Image (spheres, grey):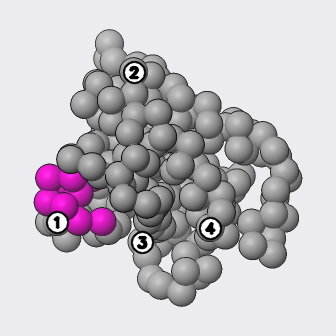
């Protein structure tokens, strides 16, 4: 198959560039356990089980690094300039929401911000206990050679940066954390990245 990367987007307040609706529930209640240790589990430990990293041995660390490298460079997204912005931290709860959605898309063979059960990204994130003040979701679908473990991250990030609405989400100063997952099924790889604050 030739290169085909399909990218989706959902961001509270930023979706107007795509011309569609979205999940904008307004200000959320005070933050939940997103930036604290939950018992003996650290929500900031950067790790994922192998099956949630599309075969990449250090998927979580590599994706976080790639997105933070992109954020460290000023860039123009469409007609909007963004200065370099702070690095994001990993968040396990955002990763759990991403893992569930990537698994759902891979298992059911669909690509959408709406889950097979009708759930929105905001609902999936809140179901983990994360209470966002800001929340956005970006997706990527790698196919053929671009679903391989060494191609998923660079192809996804390049696709997001080439798309003005997705670039705006990547470069937004609003999120402080992200969690992500990638699930392969055959020659396809479904990536979900949830950003939050």
- Foreground pick, 54 / 63: 54
Give the mark, 4 or 3, whose residue is nearer the N terminus.
Answer: 3
Coordinates of residue 189 in the picture (x, y in percent): 33, 48
Residue at x-position 47% and y-position 84%: 20
Sequence-first tag of 2 and 3? 3
Q: Which residue is mark 1?
A: 116
Q: Which residue is label 4 attached to?
A: 163
Which residue is found at the position 21% from the left and 47% from the top?
A: 186
Which of label 2 and label 3 is nearer to you? 2
Mark 1–mark 4 distance (CA, rounded to whole Å):
25 Å
Which residue lies under the disc numbered 3?
23
The magenta region covers 97-111
Left or right, residue 77 beside residue 62:
right
Q: Position of residue 54 (x, y in %)?
A: 33, 36
Predominant SS of the magenta segment: helix
Q: Please report the residue visible at 62 percent of the width from the left and 41 percent of the height from the top.
A: 67
Callouts 2 and 3 close, C-beta under 8 Å: no
């Amino acid at each position: 198959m030739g290169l085909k990367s399909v990218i989706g987007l959902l961001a509270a307040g930023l979706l107007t560039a795509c011309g569609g609706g979205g999940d904008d529930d307004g200000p959320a209640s005070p933050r939940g356990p997103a930036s604290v240790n939950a018992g003996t589990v650290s929500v900031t430990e950067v790790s994922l089980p192998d099956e949630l990293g599309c075969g990449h041995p250090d998927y979580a660390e590599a994706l976080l690094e790639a997105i933070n490298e992109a954020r460290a460079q000023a860039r123009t997204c469409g007609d909007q300039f963004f200065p370099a912005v702070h690095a994001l931290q990993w968040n396990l709860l955002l990763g759990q929401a991403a893992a569930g959605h990537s698994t759902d898309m891979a298992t059911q063979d669909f690509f959408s911000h709406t889950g097979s059960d009708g759930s929105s990204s905001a609902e999936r994130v809140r179901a983990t206990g994360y209470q966002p003040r800001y929340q956005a979701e970006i997706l990527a679908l790698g196919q053929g050679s671009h679903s391989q473990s060494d191609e998923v991250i660079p192809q996804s990030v390049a696709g997001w940066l080439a798309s003005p609405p997705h670039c705006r989400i990547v470069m937004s100063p609003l999120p402080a954390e992200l969690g992500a997952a990638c699930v392969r099924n055959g020659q396809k790889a479904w990536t979900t990245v949830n950003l939050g604050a």
